[in-house]
Structures are given as structure tokens and as C-alpha cells.
């Protein structure tokens, strides 16, 4: 598998390679939550994954394909945190080094965690600098290999292993998924999940879930072309604050997704509380947008089965407690 294509063979090959490397995260269900919602809610808890997010799946699958010479040079990527952790961990496991381009407003806890895994961090300003341009320059200067968060077939194949697990676990629980809600930044996990569902569960509708101020994929799907988010905006969902959909993943998502849904920051806080109370898991804001869109009523669950991938749990205790105890702002 090369270039930007994605295939079921590639996903299954990645799943085999990831055995013993990543955690087969649980599919959680709460009968109390189901009774309250009037339908069946399934949560794929990637917050419990190694490095605290699904991103290690794609990072490891991409890096394992590097030649010995390429591993000697090392890898480089852009990330606001979770992909950085995945790349740093995978690089360490596979005997190479990682250089991470991170926005200077990324959570300090994520930056410190990546550094503990051996990564070198290069900071940039997301409002005045372009991360892709910085990565391109560093590749040219150092010879390092780019391991992007999305837009790469091997990264997508690794992400798709979470969707395969979700589907198998749902089937084992006697559930047929009507709707899948996937937190969306660059769009790689959404594309991989939609691809898996199209192949294995074609009746399942897959939606990208985004914060209201960073709904570039939703608006791009409606416009039929990629659009950008205005600069200067912020959301508590730091993990998915992307400026525009990745070109490759948008082409896939335009073909495969049923659409996009959004949630405000206040709704995300409510979803984080709900996940903690009902499922006893700590979820970072960007990972809760699918759940938030459901709880806000934007997605119908009445007499249906809805699944969401809670993509990460990398949030420090102080910020988690502060977000859950904060009062509504009545805005994004």
C-alpha cells in the first residue's frame, strides 16, 4: 500500500502488526445511559489506549515501514499533542528519533509527555506560521521522514484498526451500528472509519464531529470544496483545532461520510461530565465532540444504536477538573 490509497488489506495488515503494541481498547456500554437516551450508546474508549489516544496506531504503522536508512535519519511531524505522543512512542519502540512541530499554545502536559518519550519539540504560532511549511523545511534540512497526522495511507490504515475493533466488538455485543460519530481534526480517523463501515457495515452512517468554531470538514462537505476556519479562533478542543481539512482525507470523506455534526464548548464539557459519570473514564475535550453532538440532540438515538470513538484522554487533572466545574458560557 503506497501513496494515499486505503484498502481493507492494508488495515488488516496493520492490525496484525499492532498486536502486542497497542491496546485492544474496550467498547463501553451503560444501561443507565441507554435508558436515559432511549437508544443504545456504544463508546470505543481510545482514551485508554497506549499514549492515551488512538494516534499511536497510525504512527507505528507508518514508521514500521521505514527502511533502516530512513530510521537512522529519523522522523518529523506536526501535532498539537496526541499524534506527537504516538509518533514519539512509536519512534522509541522502533529505534528512531522524532522531531515534533507543535503550536505554542498546545497543552504543556502533552508537550512534556512527548519530551519524556524522547521527542524534540519545535514550537510555532498557529496564527502567523504554517505548520506544513515548517515540516517541509525541516524535512529538507534534516532528511527526516514526514509521518503526517493524516493524508497518508499507512497512517490511515493504522487508524482503521480502531474501526475494525469497534465493529467486531459491537457485533459480539449483538449490536448493529446505525450511526458512528467520529471526532475530526485532519479527518484521517473519520475517513478510515467510514471506509471500514462502507466495506463491512454499509448501513452504518458515519459523521465527522467537530467543535462549532472549527467545523471546517462539515462546512467543506456542504460547500463541495475545502474551506478554512478563520484565524484567531479558539476552542477547548485543542486536539482538533485544524485550519482546514487535509486534501487527501477530504477527498475520502466527501465520498464516504454521511455529513458533519458540531458541538459547542459548553456541550463538550457536559459530555466530559457524562462520560465520567456514566462510563468512569476521563476524556479530553476534542475526544468528546461526538458524544456532545449526540447528547445535545443533534443526532437521533431514539430506538437506534449510535457508536462514537472517544479518541483520547490526554488532559491533566487540574484542567479536567476546571473544565468540569466551570459554568456554561452560552457560546462556543
Image (cartoon, rainbow, N blue to C red):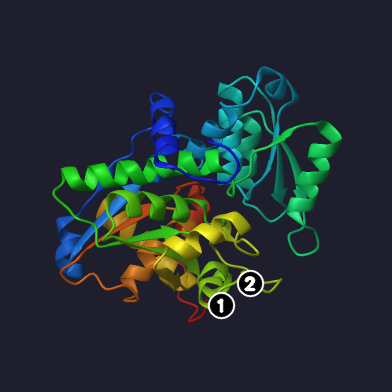
Where does residue 176 sit, x and y in percent of width and height? 19, 55
Of 1 and 268, nearer the camera is: 1
When asked about the image quadrant of residue 208, the answer is bottom left
Q: Is residue 193 above or below residue 305?
A: above
Dot 2: few (<14), some (14–19), or many (≥20) neighbours within 10 Å? some
Of 169 and 41, nearer the camera is: 169
Residue sitting at x 78%, y 45%:
136
Q: Are marks 1 and 2 in contact (CB under 8 Å)?
A: yes
Residue sitting at x 50%, y 46%:
314
Q: Which mark is residue 227?
A: 2
Tell me, yes or no, if residue 284 can be seen here.
Answer: no
Where does residue 325 sit, x and y in percent of width and height? 43, 65
Residue sitting at x 27%, y 73%:
300
Q: Which mark is residue 223?
A: 1
Q: Secondary structure at mark 2?
A: loop
Q: Secondary structure at mark 1?
A: helix
Amino acid at each position: 500500500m503506497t501513496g494515499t490509497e486505503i484498502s481493507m488489506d492494508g488495515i488488516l495488515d496493520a492490525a496484525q502488526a499492532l498486536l502486542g503494541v497497542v491496546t485492544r481498547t474496550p467498547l463501553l456500554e451503560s444501561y443507565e445511559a441507554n435508558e436515559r437516551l432511549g437508544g443504545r450508546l456504544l463508546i470505543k474508549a481510545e482514551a485508554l489506549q497506549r499514549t492515551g489516544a488512538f494516534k499511536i496506531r497510525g504512527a507505528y504503522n507508518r514508521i514500521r515501514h521505514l527502511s533502516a536508512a530512513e530510521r537512522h535519519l529519523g522522523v518529523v511531524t506536526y501535532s498539537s499533542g496526541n499524534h506527537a505522543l504516538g509518533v514519539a512512542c512509536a519512534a522509541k519502540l522502533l529505534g528512531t528519533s522524532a522531531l515534533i512541530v507543535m503550536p505554542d499554545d498546545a497543552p504543556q502536559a502533552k508537550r512534556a509527555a512527548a519530551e519524556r518519550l524522547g521527542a524534540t519539540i519545535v514550537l510555532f504560532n498557529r496564527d502567523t506560521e504554517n505548520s506544513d511549511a515548517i515540516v517541509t523545511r525541516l524535512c529538507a534540512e534534516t532528511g527526516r521522514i514526514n509521518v503526517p497526522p493524516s493524508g497518508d495511507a499507512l497512517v490511515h490504515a493504522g487508524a482503521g484498526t480502531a474501526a475494525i475493533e469497534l465493529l467486531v466488538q459491537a457485533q459480539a455485543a449483538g449490536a448493529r451500528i446505525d450511526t458512528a460519530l467520529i471526532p475530526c481534526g485532519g479527518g484521517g480517523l473519520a475517513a478510515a472509519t467510514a471506509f471500514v463501515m462502507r466495506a463491512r457495515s454499509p448501513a452504518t452512517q458515519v459523521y465527522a464531529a467537530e467543535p462549532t468554531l472549527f467545523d471546517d470538514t462539515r462546512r467543506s462537505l456542504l460547500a463541495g470544496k475545502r474551506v478554512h476556519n478563520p484565524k484567531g479562533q479558539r476552542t477547548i478542543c485543542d486536539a482538533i483545532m485544524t485550519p482546514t481539512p487535509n486534501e487527501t482525507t477530504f477527498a475520502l470523506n466527501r465520498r464516504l461520510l454521511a455529513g458533519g455534526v458540531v458541538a459547542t464548548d459548553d456541550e463538550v464539557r457536559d459530555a466530559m461530565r457524562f462520560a465520567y459519570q456514566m462510563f468512569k473514564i476521563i476524556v479530553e475535550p476534542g475526544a468528546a465532540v461526538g458524544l456532545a453532538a449526540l447528547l445535545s440532540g443533534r443526532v437521533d438515538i431514539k430506538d437506534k444504536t449510535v457508536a462514537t470513538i472517544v479518541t483520547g484522554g490526554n488532559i491533566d487533572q487540574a484542567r479536567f477538573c476546571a473544565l468540569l466545574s466551570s459554568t456554561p458560557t452560552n457560546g462556543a
